[in-house]
Image (cartoon, helix red, strand yellow):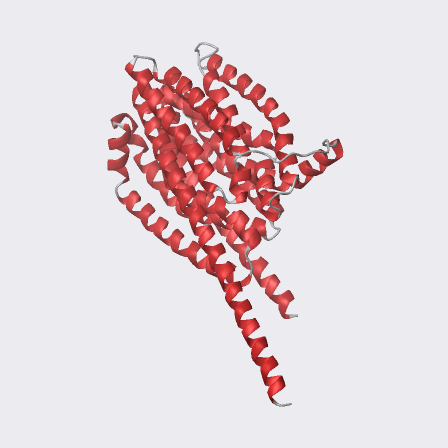
Amino acid sequence: MGAGPRFISTSGSRRKGASNASSYGREGAQSLSVIKDFAWLTSGRLIAALLQAATLILVARRAGPAEFGILSAFMGAIIVVQAMVDLGLPTYITKSRAEMIGGTQAVRALRLYGFIGLLLGVILGAVSLTFSVVAGNAWWWLLPLALAGWLERQSDVRLTIALADGDVWKNSLNLVVRRGVAILLLLLGINLQWDAIPAFGAASLLAALLSWVLSRRLVVLEEVTEPGKWSEARQIIRDSRAYWANSLGAQVRNLDVLLVGLMGNPVAAGQYGAVSRSIGPLRMVTASLSTVLLPAAVRFKGEQRRKLRWAIIAILSLMSALYILLVIFSKDIVVLLLGTAYAPASFAFQLVVIGLIFASITSVLTPLLQAEGQQAVVGRASLSFSLVSLAGVAAGTYFGGVTGAGAGLAITYAFHCMVLICVFVFSHRKKLEVSNA
């Protein structure tokens, strides 16, 4: 009789050990998957950002600060219009797909965006016409860039499906191909003695068209047999509104160059725009981490999430060290890359890079809070601080020129970061109190 219970207990322990081993195996596999996704996305985005930075540096040097200021302001307007029109659907698609891979809700949302995307094309065309006429150029001067912005957004939104499914390499491949083709075509246009802005527009349009075709090859959607209902579309839009506030808040900052031009002059806008656009590669690591974190934070629980936080801290520490080195050598970097015409923006570059330390922390906290259901708070904070940021840039330009604009941007980055840290700490204390009650 004594042996029986011992036999059952041993078997149970074995089953429990096997179960624990299986659980640890699954956790390890999921952690490795996040690392792999992060590596794919970071490498792809970093290469793409370096290619884009090189492209913009070529355009800035050939066009000069005044023309480049107009171009930078228009590119910022494209990003803001994209965020205004997309209604937060890209983030909604990513999260809903991550929660239920193979479900139809994300596909329905993507098809809804297809109709919304038509409106985006019309608005971007109108904005390009306005900028071209006000700048005293031909009406079509910026139209290729507007069409490129429309096609790029269609590709990026479709590829959110691949991101949520874990096929991050598809996003990286598409982005690198787009940026690589754009710089090659720009070099061809320069060799043919085209003006810098039209050459850049034509290169961007052809690269965006290739990107759109490639995205449809890479992401094949499941068949949805039931026709979509207007009530379902309205529910999707309601659910995505919180993400929309965050997206719009994050992107409305891109109107900063336009404000510098209005409060200062086109040359100041060009100098500030060259600095603010050239830091793109510096944000790619944390931006990629932020993108990968949302589906991971939705799925990970307990010990997995704690391990993830330590990895995040390590990455943020390395990026902060890199930013500090760039601050030290900022003046040489600006003159080397952009030329002496942009030297007055060197101190502004220093200030913006310091601000990026705080912006990196903010970009990582955002998906962690969204995964915990705090998307409304995150969205309101993002939109509020973006508006404050624009006010800071405008006031800084008025009182301190390009340097003042950089200071206004950096200060708002810092305050936004501190607010999200407080929300994160308060949220976790509240959860601990509930679990201990």
Looking at the image, is 203 positioned above or below residue 417? above
Outermost residue toward the bottom? 2
Q: Is residue 74 above or below residue 225?
A: above
Q: In this view of the protein, which residue sits in the foreground, 29 or 194?
A: 29
Residue 132 x %, y %: 47, 14
**Is residue 106 at all visible to an observer of this figure?**
yes
Label total for image = 0
Q: Residue at x 33, y 13 (%)?
A: 194
Q: Residue at x 61, y 80 (%)?
A: 8
* Relative depth, front residue between 48 and 128: 48
What is the x, y in percent for residue 185?
35, 20
Depth order, front residue of 288/129:
288
Work out whether residue 359 can be spotted.
no
x 56%, y 80%: residue: 10
> Where the N terminus falls, by quadrant?
bottom right
Q: Position of residue 124 (x, y in %)?
A: 54, 21
Instruction: Name the side, left or right, on which 391 lies relative to 185.
Output: right
Quarter of the figure that contains the C terminus: bottom right
User: Residue 179 at x, y = what percent?
Assistant: 39, 29
In the image, residue 217 sits, relative to residue 325, either above or below, namely above
Q: Residue 352, relative to residue 35: is it above or below?
A: above
Asked whether, in this view, residue 5 is left or right of residue 35, the answer is right
Side of 45 relative to 58 (left or right): right
